[in-house]
Amino acid sequence: MPVEITWWGHATCTIADADIRVLTDPLFARRLAHLRRRRGALPTPDAWRADVALVSHLHSDHLHIPSLARLAPGTRLLVPRGAPRAVPGLRRLTRLRVTEMAPGDETTVGDLRVRAVSARHDGRRLPVGRHHSPALGYVVEGEARTYFAGDTGLFESMAEEVGQVDVAVLPVGGWGPYLGEGHLDA
């Protein structure tokens, strides 16, 4: 069965590969600060079902504690190394199996191999303060090779580090005429 990807809004997707459901940067809210869901209804509870959820970085629109709390007990959660220390709410999600990742780390979930790769993005929880965690992308390898970039700008070793992929889930956006460091444009 080929990989199937469902986009739920913002950076949230379900990647179904090798009978494993991978959820990316879960955000199941109508509004978060300046971000508003502009089209479509909130995803149904079926969207919350995953074998593993990937968190790319600590910004609230990518590591959203209320959305993570909706995941089923025992769901595996891959987060950037240092995230539980930097985000106290994450430590309270004791029903989830949290694994900290850094670029180059690999883990398996069923028949999938998930590898963390670098991202060029500010990985801090807040715009000020210390860097506690790297921003990450992930390469999910099963029947296909899927690259989930999280938020990232281009960087010199991206092609080498990510490698050949069948599908790339890339963030393309910005705020008005200024895109900001650590983002891709069209």
Image: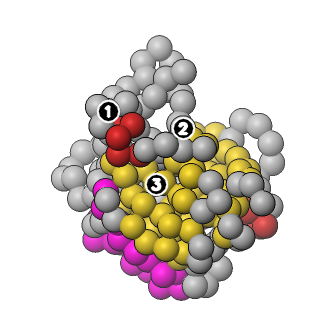
In magenta, the rendered stretch is 83-103
Nearest the viewer among 61 and 112 is 112
Marks 2 and 3: in contact by CB < 8 Å? Answer: no
**104 shown above or below 112:** above
Kindly report the distance in space between the C-alpha atoms of the residues bearing marks 3 and 2.
Answer: 11 Å
Query: x and y percent of residue 78 in the render?
Result: 45, 68
Q: Secondary structure at mark 1?
A: loop
Which callout, 1 or 2, points at the residue further toward the start of the chain?
1
Q: Which residue is mark 1?
A: 155
Q: Position of residue 86 (x, y in %)?
A: 29, 65
* Amino acid found under the numbered disc labelled 1: Phe
Residue drawn at x 37%, y 26% is 180
Q: Position of residue 167 (x, y in %)?
A: 61, 43
Work out whether residue 159 can be spotted: yes
* Residue on which the image places disc 2: 170
Split into 4 quadrants, where in the image is the C terminus?
A: top right
Under mark 3, the amino acid is Tyr
Residue occupying the point 53% across, 58% down: 140
* Magenta span includes 91: yes
Is residue 121 left or right of 73 when viewed as pictured? left
Residue 32 visible somewhere in the drawing? no
At horizontal 54% and vertical 38% (from top left) the residue drawn is 170
Using the numbered discs, state the Cα–Cα distance from disc 1 to disc 3 in whole angstroms: 15 Å
Asked if residue 173 is positioned above or below residue 168 in the image, the reply reads above
Q: Locate residue 151: give its quadrant.
A: top left
Are the two marked residues, 1 and 2, in contact with CB atoms closer than 8 angstroms? no
